[in-house]
Image (cartoon, rainbow, N blue to C red):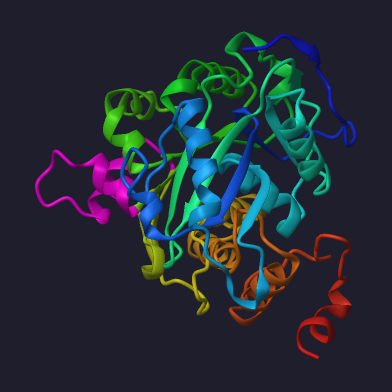
Amino acid sequence: MGIEIQTEINNHGEESPVILGLQPAALVDHVARVDWSLLSQIAGEAGGSFPVEADELKFILREVNAHIISLPENASPLKTIAGGSVVNTIRGLAAGFGIRCGIIGACGDDDEGNLFIDNMNSYKVDLSRLRLKTGHTAQCVCLVDELGNRTMRPCLSSAVKVQANDLTTSDFRGSKWLVMRYGIFNLEVIQAAIKIAKQVGVCISLDLASFEMVRKFKPQLLQLLESGSIDLCFANEDEAMELLSDEENADPESALIFLAKYCRWTVVTLGAKGCIAMHGKEVVRVPAIGESKVIDATGAGDLFASGFLYGLVKGVSLEECCKIGSCSGGSVIRSLGGEVTPQNWQWMYKQMHTKGLAIPLPLPLHGGIICSSDFDSHFFP
């Protein structure tokens, strides 16, 4: 898996990140808008996310150019960025909400590793817990169809990644939350991270990853939930239904209640129908906020988590957490890839302002900030 050659890549100050993300293998996303015929040529179900080997990744990348379709307004139909569910959430928190964030993981000493570091550095994400190792950085092809639905095929098998025995208490001490994504191939490091994080009082947020991952590795997931170590759990509708696939009359509400037996906060996102959430005995249902044509659904759940976690950190109500999450989730689907553009952050701030939600002031817009006194003149000239 590579030889560690450098422990610290950067350090943005001694103050610990408020929110950490555990992504054992740094990942570079190749996001492309393609026609449906390519999706029929690759293994696995359309719409899901499941790992592939290097040869399959190369095949898909070769075929992308032949199946690519153009985007409106001359936007690029292909984008390569730092990726992965956890990275999307952490980058969103740093870029759109101004929360101090950091990444725990490892990247390779290759071009993809350099791209990952440069991208995250540009948003001032703390990378002092990112190990640089000799070897390859993980890659993922994100195929987006004409309706904006995405099919993801990550290649992780030959990539460097952080191991369970790499983790130390100092990685977690001083932070409030640890964000992670369920994955069977990272289960050992996930369990190690949870154990250490809990020892220093860090709360755990878990995303269920994909319906395919839930289906194929449900026993291990249930064991993780039943441990009582997960404070916050995010699931989309497909993942929620898959979780209760053995039950009669399963629905998102039933899945929400099931998850709430093990987690303090639970959220099931419902796409265009909004979301439902539960904390203690409180249950809220929040519709999707703001009309937006879906260009690419990649990162919608990840950016929803950014907004929801921002709300938790700021101590707002469960309903407001969901509304902020709906705004941030809606911002990323307006362009290709899981990285929100400055224009779409502005769209989100307008939605939040209109709904009377707490705006992160001064606004942490990429490339500069906007003070509270300038808000109305900037967004409502």
Magenta-highlighted residues: 237-264
Quadrant of the snapshot with the C terminus: bottom right
- Is 128 rendered above or below residue 40? above
Q: How many marks?
A: 0
Q: Which quarter of the figure is the N terminus placed in?
A: top right
Front one among 63 and 39: 63
- Residue at 31% x, 50% y is 238
Q: Nearer the viewer, residue 110 or 303?
A: 110
* Image-based side of 378 in relation to 142, left or right: right
Q: On the picture, is 117 further left or further right than 325?
A: right
| Residue 334 in sight from this viewpoint | yes
Judge whether residue 126 is colored magenta.
no
Answer with the quarter of the image where residue 14 lies.
Answer: top right
Q: Is residue 61 above or below residue 158?
A: below
Q: Position of residue 338 (x, y in %)?
A: 60, 53
Residue farthest to the bottom, as pictured: 381
